[in-house]
Amino acid sequence: MSDRTGTVKRKTSETDIEITIDLDGSGKSDVDTGIGFFDHMLKSFAKHGFFDLTVKVKGDLEVDCHHTIEDTGIALGEAVKKALGDKKGIRRYGYFILPMDETLALCAIDLSGRPYLCFDADFTVDRVGGFDTEMVREFFYAVSYSCGMNLHIRQLAGSNNHHIIEAIYKAFAKALDMAVGFDPRITDVLSTKGSL
């Protein structure tokens, strides 16, 4: 098995980001974005997807959390894309329905190379900690488009906003773990086109 690690450095006037992801890790993480709840979500993503993840972000949090979260999503999507390489042998598709107390979240992924996001979740508060709830969609939009991933996320049940967001991140982790996994029956790429 080749090394499936992707590193991305992204620096703008708003953020300075370095991300490394190992798709064949054990769930270890070292995350510092300056937003406690966002760190918690990224650590949960790493743990439940069995990805080794390092995220270091310096963002313009004196403005708000938008640039930090969106740009981290862009960098994470690019890192996953790099780590996947030619995508030979991967399952391509992944899905998971994750329960967390009263919440149930669905995530389905196609690593097709074609970006698309369908997102359906209802939040009843504007913020959880220093994290704006509207940024959940923006983060996953950024990941899907920079990775070239068809991504469907749906809240099936739930009333606690912390639980809803955490269940979404964990469901995404489990679905991505499935999609990037290998199937011995797939010797090339899983596409009639011959490429993904």
Image (cartoon, rainbow, N blue to C red):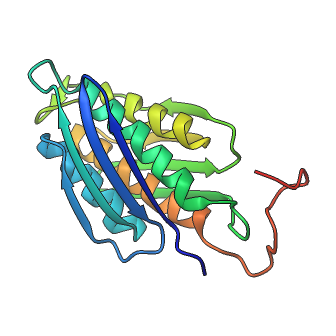
On screen, 21 above or below 114? below
Quick one: 134 or 11, which is closer to the camera? 11
191 displayed left or right of 108: right
On screen, 33 above or below 6? above
| Residue 179 visible in the displayed image | yes
94 displayed left or right of 29: right
On screen, 150 above or below 81? above
67 displayed left or right of 185: left
Residue depicted at x 59% and y 77%: 2
Residue depicted at x 91% and y 54%: 192
The image position of residue 82, as x and y in percent, is: 54, 54
Name, please, the residue furthest toward the right. 192
The image position of residue 22, as x and y in percent, is: 43, 67
| Residue 133 visible in the displayed image | no
Picture quadrant where residue 134 is located: top left
118 displayed left or right of 189: left
Residue depicted at x 61% and y 81%: 1
Count of numbered tags: 0
